[in-house]
Amino acid sequence: MSDPNTADLHHGEIANLEDLIDRESLREVCRSFFDLFGLSIRVFSARGSLLANVHEERSLCRYVNSLGEGRIACAAIVEEVQGIVPEATTVVHPCFSGAVYHVVPIIYDDRRLGRIVIGPFIPSDVKAPPEAMLQIDPKVDPGRARAALLEMPRVRPATAERIAAHLRGVLDLILFSGHRAHLTSAMHLATVRENYRELAERNARLQEAYDKLKELDRLKSNFLATVSHELRTPLTSIIGYSEMLQTGIAGDLSEEQAGFVETIRTKGELLLSLITSLLDLNKLERGQLNIELEMVDPRAILAEVRETYHPEAERKGIRLEVYCGDDTPYMQADPVRLRQILINLAGNAIKFTPSGGRVDLEAMAVETSFHDEELDDGFGAALMMAPEPAIEFRVRDNGIGIAEDQAERIFDAFYQVDGGSTREFGGAGLGLSIAKNLVEAHHGAIHIESELGHGTTFIVTIPQAPPDPD
Ligand SMILES: Nc1ncnc2c1ncn2[C@@H]1O[C@H](COP(=O)(O)OP(=O)(O)O)[C@@H](O)[C@H]1O
Ligand SMILES: [Mg+2]
């Protein structure tokens, strides 16, 4: 057995005449020979199937077939002719009627693919019905036999040879182009098959890599959850004991001791908030963070955020203001998470704004269409939902700004524009990633407008009420 993947390539070996030749063009060639020379032509494949058949019943044949014995003898001749398989050259087969058949081999690439049967016709030197014809049936009428014979096509043997050679030449051409087409399609098939095999292999490798990555991701998540949890417990003790020391429970502290304890506590709190962020992000990425909706007053949330950052803004000499109309409606949101989003954004705004700058916190009612990814038609034309009421929060600063090419990446976990060992600002690069995940958990969207050196505005849009689950 040959390898099924390469078998097609070996089909340079010609299999069958019927596979190589277009029957329609073969028939057409035979028909034009018939029209030109008036000779019946039949083409058989090596297996004996009739591929083309252009003929006309001749008067002589009709006459023979009208006689009982004649019909039997004629059928025998036809059978004999069909059984002839010429080796290399034309076989001339005579009929009792004086007519002959030429059986011409079709040879291509040293292989016998079939044969052409030309005739019956009368060789030009036969002028009268032979004895055999007159004896074929008791009812033969010599006069009618002679008349019928004279109506037959009459060809000189040399001419018959030339016609056969011609026909073979034309057939050769058809075969050649058929062979070429056959080869081309075989090659094409083999190439397609090979490409497909490669693709399937690559797919399998990709799937493997993907599975591995997924497993790694799961391990990472588990690891993160465990480590964070294990770190949190001792940290809470460190912070708790520092606070106790500060309250004087264990006796008065010298000014230097108080300073050290304060550092332990603030650094401990920083570490705790970092660990909390990691845990949050982990939960968000695994879809394990639950959003608990209630009616929330956007104004109140902004006021709380301002409250949180008021001391720090004051220390840095930054004006921190809330702008929110009295008529701003309540919304359905998780107040803890909404506050967390805005705290992250406001914290950044203050961190990345030099002293003397300003940070504005705004909220207003808007009508917005949220882009539903599941309805995206995949051609870039996003299908928009009908506009719905939403609350738009803006956190605007006139700080250092963000370059356009960074604007998408800053939402990636751990990404920081000036990341590296010489960082000027603190943080771990998790805040925006968490904020974005939380906004999306509220079915909202977050955008950024920024100009390097002039300031940044983060725009968070959250539906006033969550969409129906269906
Ligand atoms: N208001 C802003 N102005 C300028 N750059 C900002 C602002 N907010 C965020 N960035 C950039 O995006 C990065 C990622 O922000 P974030 O995820 O909150 O991480 P972190 O604050 O811990 O650095 C920041 O490091 C900073 O480079
Ligand atoms: Mg931040």
Image (cartoon, grey):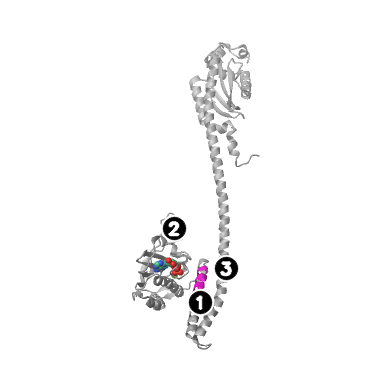
Please tell me which of labels 2 and 3 falls first in the chain: 3
Question: Residue 332's spot in the image, x, y percent?
Answer: 43, 72
Q: Nearer the viewer, residue 239 or 278?
A: 239
Which residue position is annotated with label 3?
Answer: 223
103 magenta-colored: no
Q: Amino acid at mark 2?
A: Asp
In the rendered structure, the answer to whether residue 438 lies left or right of residue 61 reads left
Q: Main secondary structure of the magenta part?
A: helix
Q: Quadrant of residue 66?
A: top right
Q: Nearer the viewer, residue 434 or 300?
A: 434
From mark 2 to mark 1, how far is it between C-alphas?
A: 46 Å
Q: Amino acid at mark 1?
A: Gly
Q: Nearer the viewer, mark 3 or mark 1?
A: 1
Residue at 56% in and 77% down: 234
Which residue position is annotated with label 2?
Answer: 376
Q: Nearer the viewer, mark 2 or mark 1?
A: 1
Question: Residue 258's spot in the image, x, y percent?
Answer: 48, 83
269 magenta-colored: yes
- Tell me the magenta residue range: 266-282
User: Do tag 3 and tag 1 residues touch (Cβ < 8 Å)?
Assistant: no
User: Do tag 2 and tag 1 residues touch (Cβ < 8 Å)?
Assistant: no
Kindly tell me whether mark 1's CB lies below 8 Å from ligand 1. no
Kindly tell me whether mark 2's CB lies below 8 Å from ligand 1. no
